[in-house]
Image: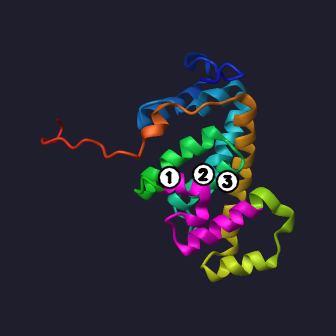
Amino acid sequence: MTTPRYPAPELNDLPEDIKAKVLEVQEKSGFIPNVFLALARRPAEWRAFFAYHDALMLREESSLTKGDREMIVTTTSAANSCLYCVVAHGAILRIVEKKPLVADQVAVNYRKADITPRQRAMLDFAMKVCQRSAEIDDADFVTLHTHGFSDEDIWDIGAITAFFGLSNRVANMSSMMPNPEFYLMGRVPRPKHDKPGA
């Protein structure tokens, strides 16, 4: 396995505000995603990164679902050859969409994926932002409007794509590797117990 180029700080060495957030994530997911420690080597950047991440990914005044957002991240991260983000956000996509195949499909070729025409239009635009942003014109907005996206939704699509373009490049530059836990998440059903609490 590839070794990260920059060693992550120890959890107990983190500033208290960052340590508290990391422990909160660990409590929720059962492990600490590597990105949380990798970026904590520069606390000011960590705070700025996750503030913008949360502003985009948790924004409520939008018609984009959590699945839509994760689909944008997975698709454009694949275009940027970012192993960390494809694996990590692909796992989240499988869970929120409850479709174990969709993350692999959009990472390889979203045009053939089991998604709606609206999501396909969204990803067409995200990929244009990702790869050919200088070519965006009014016609792109007209197309998205016909699928029910508002101008603010379109900003969300573009901003998520751009933000994760930054994330993809930092992850690739630093050789950030996905946690092993991400690979199986959402692929196989959790075992059901006969008795509650068993």
Q: Residues within 10 Å of mark 3 (few under 14, many from 20)?
A: many
Residue type, label 2:
Thr
Secondary element at image label 2: helix
Q: Is residue 145 in the magenta section? A: no
Q: Position of residue 46 (x, y in %)?
A: 68, 34
Q: Are marks 2 and 3 in contact (CB under 8 Å)?
A: yes
Q: Residues within 10 Å of mark 1 (few under 14, many from 20)?
A: many
Q: Position of residue 107 (x, y in %)?
A: 59, 52
Tell me the tag on residue 74.
2
Q: Are marks 1 and 3 in contact (CB under 8 Å)?
A: no
Q: Which residue is mark 1?
A: 93
Between the residue at mark 2 and the residue at mark 1, the CA separation in whole angstroms equals 8 Å
**Is 119 above or below relative to 38?**
below
Please name whichever residue, 195 or 57, is drawn nearer the observer in this view of the structure. 195
Tell me the tag on residue 185.
none
Q: Is residue 117 in the magenta section? A: yes
Left or right: 181, with 132 as reference point: left
Name which residue lies at 30% across and 43% down: 190
Q: Are marks 2 and 1 in contact (CB under 8 Å)?
A: yes
Residue type, label 1:
Leu
Left or right: 31, with 188 as reference point: right
| Residue range of the region highlighted in magenta in the rendering | 102-128
Name which residue lies at 69% across and 48% down: 164
Q: Which residue is mark 3?
A: 76
Q: Position of residue 9 (x, y in %)?
A: 63, 19
Secondary element at image label 1: helix
Residue 61 in view of the camera:
no
Between the residue at mark 1 and the residue at mark 3, the CA separation in whole angstroms equals 13 Å
